[in-house]
Amino acid sequence: MPDYRQLEKDFLELLKEQKAYQEALALIQWDLRTKIPPKGVDQRSEVIGFLSQKVFQITTSEKMKMYIDSLKGKASNPIIQRSLEECEEEYNRNRKIPEVEFKEFTMLQSKSETLWQEAREKGDFAQLQPYLEKLIEYNKKFAEYWGYEKNRYDALLHVYEPGVTTELLDEVFPALRRSLAGLLKKITASERKPDSTILQKHFPKQAQETFSLEILKRMGYDFAAGRLDETIHPFAIAINPRDVRVTTRYDESDFRMAIFGTIHEGGHALYEQNIDQAMAQTPLADGTSMGIHESQSLFWENFVARSEAFWENHYSLFKHIAPDEFDDIPFSDFYCAVNEVKPSLIRIEADELTYCLHIMVRYELEKALINDEIEVRDLPELWNQKMEDYLGIRPQSDREGVLQDIHWAAGDFGYFPSYALGYMYAAQFHQKLETTLDVESAIKSGNFAAIKNWLGENIHQYGKLKKPLEILQDVTGEGLNPEFLVEHLQSKYARIYQF
Amino acid sequence: MPDYRQLEKDFLELLKEQKAYQEALALIQWDLRTKIPPKGVDQRSEVIGFLSQKVFQITTSEKMKMYIDSLKGKASNPIIQRSLEECEEEYNRNRKIPEVEFKEFTMLQSKSETLWQEAREKGDFAQLQPYLEKLIEYNKKFAEYWGYEKNRYDALLHVYEPGVTTELLDEVFPALRRSLAGLLKKITASERKPDSTILQKHFPKQAQETFSLEILKRMGYDFAAGRLDETIHPFAIAINPRDVRVTTRYDESDFRMAIFGTIHEGGHALYEQNIDQAMAQTPLADGTSMGIHESQSLFWENFVARSEAFWENHYSLFKHIAPDEFDDIPFSDFYCAVNEVKPSLIRIEADELTYCLHIMVRYELEKALINDEIEVRDLPELWNQKMEDYLGIRPQSDREGVLQDIHWAAGDFGYFPSYALGYMYAAQFHQKLETTLDVESAIKSGNFAAIKNWLGENIHQYGKLKKPLEILQDVTGEGLNPEFLVEHLQSKYARIYQF
């Protein structure tokens, strides 16, 4: 009989090695997006390639396979058992693709990403088209290798949001869309027109940083285990479980970018900072899915920082830090401006209400692409048509249409739905929290500890120990339900737009 | 017959792997000393251990040995040939030590470094003594394993300054000491007393940074291949050949720390930035020795930035950036204050003249320790006596005596002489440069390109392609010669102290 305890030890050692490579890679990624001088990039890319290959080799090694086969079902605790399952998933995902195809795909991704920047700049979809076609072919092949029950797209969804299926999304998204469309109609019809241009006054970077740091502190972000830096595309990154960094971008003519961005990334970071340390050196020390991760950032951004209660407490601090030009804005104008709803063409600039409509456009198109129902060459027209159908506006160029996001050009299909799932999960968590805490009063008091602790206890601590829908079920007692998001938006905008 | 070209290719591939690990390690080191949040450190140390072990495994691998044996003498170009020699040196250095001893030594180093901080704080030499004894025992053993011709200490010197021997130092140091003592006597006797306390006025960090950045730019430091950050113990680090970073420390009550520190580290960085790119992925992409490296930092710090010509040009810029309190300092008082000579107890605070005397104290003691001529327990007393003999002052505690430096506590013996060698090399290079360029006028004009290019062409570009004394010989036509340093100090201080 094999010595299981020794095998477990060896397995954990291998996970540590993998983590060591991943930690080095994470630091390199952070540096690449915050500090690296331009001439250093080329050589650093080589290092990324080398270290990523080492991780890939571990995840697909015979040794790994041996641990999985020997230990699965015999693990001495749930952390090891779930780690084995995670490793098995990854082993299968990576091993099922022939090595040569994986390499070709990776090279194609990298070329296509670079090309995308140029194509977007010029609004030239034709330039990207052949690359997209190939990337989709690979995604279809991979989905076949990985397998699925009902819909080929499920295999891709599974990578980002295990448990969520095309069937579920096809039930939930249309219902959500109808509700959002109804709300949007009322808002458009309202005579109340919040004006966000009143917010576009000069606000020096330094002062924006002061406010951002103060809010992060109040959220309970641990600065002894993290830091805030400047970047072009904001992100949060766990370099190790005790070093979880936040980045933000300062636009001196629009403070919303930095302040809501910092709070959003801070929400991601709180998740990573509060995963149980017992999992620190395992693959479970990570958010359980893209969607649950997004629910945490959106919880803080939308349910906390865009709420009336938040600004009732923080508007005086804001005015204290902001330049004098903001002094004349009455509270209610300010709060409404921060929550202005206005269909727009660019996803990352969308408001809280229309955001999910952007996601549905993408979801329906990528699902159809993967299932051979539409052609890549028709994408621009289909995109524009859907934008008109769902948001009532039509892009005038592919730059503000199908070319705006990097995801497809980077070969990522099945990722977009996570964003909308994050909105719904966040609303479900919020509704549940309200049954045990007067959330509004907590926000108004500016003491966020109760909120942070509830999220920590119910979601963060588990890392990947629970699957996304398992967490949702355990916390709320039900599955995915778009109603709570709709209720939240309905009650919020009814006040703002008075309908 | 083996396929040598293929073997060479494979050898270069192995060097690239090694470089990839080293690049990740260098970035981690930079981060550790500039940005990391405190709680992230423990886990990061594990990663350092893991990656360092990978490097060690490559340098001591059978594969490496095979390349060395197969290719040495048959390399198709000098870069490959010298790389093979470097790899052989390292292979031998690491393989000659039994693995268990190397591991014990490494663990001892790390414990001793930590302990040293406490011992220094308390001025308690006895606490460190048993560790020092063991570390010295290991160093003696290692020296025996590595081998030497005449003096056991040579084996240690060789690690930092290949080619330089105890015999050479025993000839050069006493001569230099006598000259420095003579100069010091004249200075002490002089009625001129420059007063450096006039420089100790409040100078905000931001403004110090502005001045530092401007000087780095003028030196020709390439900011597209580097950056300046804040740290506690300043350093320069080549993360890769196109990413060479400088760090500095801001003391708001004494600008000299940051400004001369930045220029010093900038000198190191210029060296690394200007190594021939053809060596980029080999062990030759590095300064050729500690001493030559130090000669480059000292060239810029002492021969450029502490010169009268430099301040004649830059004093107006300095006054423009510095707070108003500096306005009243006449140029000559300022220049003399910056060059005040005053025997002091702490090496890193020493002036340009007395610095080498601090080094000689350490050299003589560590040489005697390695050759069993003195006992560790007698070190404090011997240290204090030598300080009195050479500098005329006596430490009142071991904190400002034998415990001040980390080097011995970290197990590094044979390192200290490099600092003094750097002074002498720099003076020799400076004298040579003066035969082809009016250095004073170049400095006065503020256009440092001619200086930077000369150092680049004569020293920097070669990396480790030439050994330290080979570079010295090729550039100056002679070996180590302390006379030029003495001449430089004599002529400089004769003006300042009027003797």
Image: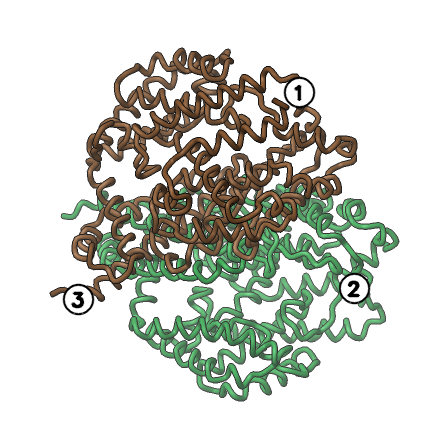
Chain colours: A brown, B green
Q: Is residue B274 at least partly visible in the picture? A: no
Q: In this view of the protein, which residue sits in the foreground, A312 or A392?
A: A312
Could you tell me which residue is drawn at 49 percent across and 29 percent down? Answer: A486
Nearer-the-camera pick, B239 or A393: A393
| Quarter assignment of residue B234 | bottom right
Q: Which residue is mark 3?
A: A3
- Crowding at dot 1, Cα within 10 Å, few <14 / some 14-19 / many 20+, comes out as few
Secondary structure at numbered mark 2: helix
Q: Are marks 3 and 1 on the same chain?
A: yes
Residue at image coords 25%, 44%:
A89
Mark 3 vs mark 2, foreground winner is 3
**Tag 3 and tag 2, C-beta contact below 8 Å:** no
Q: Chain of mark 2?
A: B
Per the model, the C-alpha gap separating discs 3 and 2 is: 71 Å
Q: Chain of mark 3?
A: A
Q: Amino acid at mark 3?
A: Asp
Q: Which residue is mark 2?
A: B196
What is the secondary structure assignment of the residue under circle 1? Answer: loop
At label 2, which amino acid type do we have? Ser
Distance of label 1 from label 2 (alpha carbons):
68 Å
Considering only vertical position in the picture, is A170 above or below B221? above
- The residue at the point 70 percent across, 74 percent down is B344
Q: Is residue A389 above or below residue A26?
A: above
* Labelled disc at residue A192: 1
- Viewer-side label of 3, 1: 1
CB within 8 Å, label 1 to label 2: no
Q: Residue furthest right?
A: B328
Q: Marks 1 and 2: same chain? A: no
Whether discs 3 and 2 lie on one chain: the answer is no
Q: Quadrant of the C terminus of chain A?
A: top right
Task: Please state which amino acid type lies under the numbered disc 1.
Answer: Arg
